[in-house]
């Protein structure tokens, strides 16, 4: 157990509602299946374009993953804008197979666009429902407000970055400035953008709301943005898990499983019993 797991013997408070906890683990599972089934779908057309059109005759791709014969052997090649990288063994050609993303990182592992799409759409709708439930519950129980940084939070960003860099973490009743900014960024910006760019690629949704595809500048741009949001969420995921591990994994995970969180002793305000919050 790390020191951060028992912040100097502070009190236990009820910090995460059952709605936050349940939605959190469902969307974490959804994003796992969405990422890997999305990479299966990406493998069917392993390049990212800008605009409305796609195909050989257009020069509008910003990323392309493929394979090519070089000096009698197959090499995996990844092109980003006009710069090419030899990515043999990782992207383009790995384990003796020409495949943009290696089989170990796709669902299913074998090449099957149809199964990939079925898995992707199932978890996409489950994510939409989960996020809608989280928004409604968080609006009703006031949790939504706790994710919006206040003016004083914004002044704390510098000191918080400094204390995070020294692996010193505060265990407060409410999220700190960096947590509000990152969690708020994920819930108010990245996930809605992912859902909107995803919907924009659906022909039936285009018939219902054609303005959304226009807003993103065409199907190929929407697909590219969808991919970039996935990469941003992946970046968030790694930093998030490292922060949970560094700030006291048992305390953090307990709060996300049972709701109960141990705060620093100086956080306990006189007159407010630490465990008085009712489950909402
Ligand atoms: C892609 C997957 C994930 C996403 C998008 C995500 C996102 C989030 C968000 C937005 C919150 C704040 C929720 C709220 O207050 O309503 C949160 C909290 C939390 N998450 Fe995740 N999460 C993911 C995966 C994980 C995993 C795998 C773990 C386990 C290591 C984890 C552990 C936690 C904990 C302990 C908290 C509470 C943190 C705190 O008190 O600061 N999350 N997560």
Image (tube, helix red, strand yellow):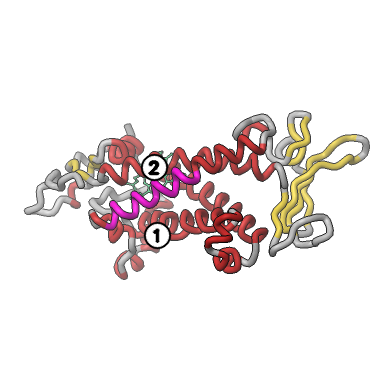
Residue 166 lies, in percent from the top left, at 40, 50
Give neighbour class at mark 1: few <14, some 14-19, many 20+ (Cα, 10 Å).
some
**How many marks overall?**
2
Residue at 80%, 62% (x, y): give it: 59
Front disc: 2 or 1: 1
Q: Visible in this render: residue 238? A: no
Q: Which residue is mark 2?
A: 244
Q: Are marks 2 and 1 in contact (CB under 8 Å)?
A: no
* Residue at the limit of the structure toward the left, as seen here: 271
Residue at the (24%, 56%) spot, across then down: 140
Tag 1 secondary structure: helix
Quadrant location of the N terminus?
A: top left
Relative height, residue 146 to residue 122 (above, below): below
Q: Position of residue 211 (x, y in %)?
A: 56, 68
Would you identify the image quadrant in which residue 87 lies? top right
Q: Is residue 274 left or right of residue 20?
A: left
C-alpha span from label 2 to label 1: 16 Å
Figure quadrant of residue 7:
top left
Q: Is mark 2 within 8 Å of ligand 1?
A: yes
Q: Which residues are magenta?
A: 124-139
On residue 181, which mark appears?
1
Quadrant in the rendering for residue 116: top right
Residue 14 among magenta residues: no
Q: Are there few (<14), some (14-19), or many (20+) residues within 10 Å of tag 2?
A: some
Q: Main secondary structure of the magenta part?
A: helix
């Amino acid at each position: 157990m790390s020191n951060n797991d028992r912040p100097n013997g502070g009190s236990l408070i009820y910090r995460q509602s059952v709605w936050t906890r349940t939605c959190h683990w469902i969307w974490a599972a959804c994003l796992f299946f969405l990422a890997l089934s999305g990479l299966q779908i990406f493998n069917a057309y392993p390049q990212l374009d800008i605009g409305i059109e796609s195909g050989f005759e257009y020069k509008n791709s910003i990323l392309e993953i493929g394979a090519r014969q070089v000096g009698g052997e197959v090499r995996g090649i990844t092109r980003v804008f006009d710069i090419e990288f030899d990515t043999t063994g990782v992207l383009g050609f790995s384990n003796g197979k020409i495949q943009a993303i290696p089989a170990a990182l796709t669902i299913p592992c074998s090449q099957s666009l149809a199964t990939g799409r079925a898995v992707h759409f199932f978890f996409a709708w489950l994510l939409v429902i989960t996020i809608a439930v989280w928004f409604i519950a968080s609006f009703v129980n006031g949790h939504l407000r706790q994710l919006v940084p206040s003016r004083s939070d914004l002044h704390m960003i510098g000191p918080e970055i400094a204390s995070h860099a020294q692996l010193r973490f505060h265990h407060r009743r409410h999220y700190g400035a960096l947590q509000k900014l990152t969690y708020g960024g994920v819930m108010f910006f990245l996930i809605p953008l992912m859902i909107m760019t995803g919907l924009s690629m659906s022909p039936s949704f285009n018939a219902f709301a054609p303005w959304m595809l226009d807003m993103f500048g065409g199907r190929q741009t929407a697909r590219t943005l969808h991919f970039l949001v996935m990469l941003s969420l992946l970046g968030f995921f790694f930093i998030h898990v490292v922060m949970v591990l560094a700030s006291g994994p048992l305390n953090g995970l307990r709060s996300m499983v049972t709701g109960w969180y141990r705060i620093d002793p100086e956080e306990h305000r006189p007159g407010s019993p630490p465990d008085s919050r009712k489950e909402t």
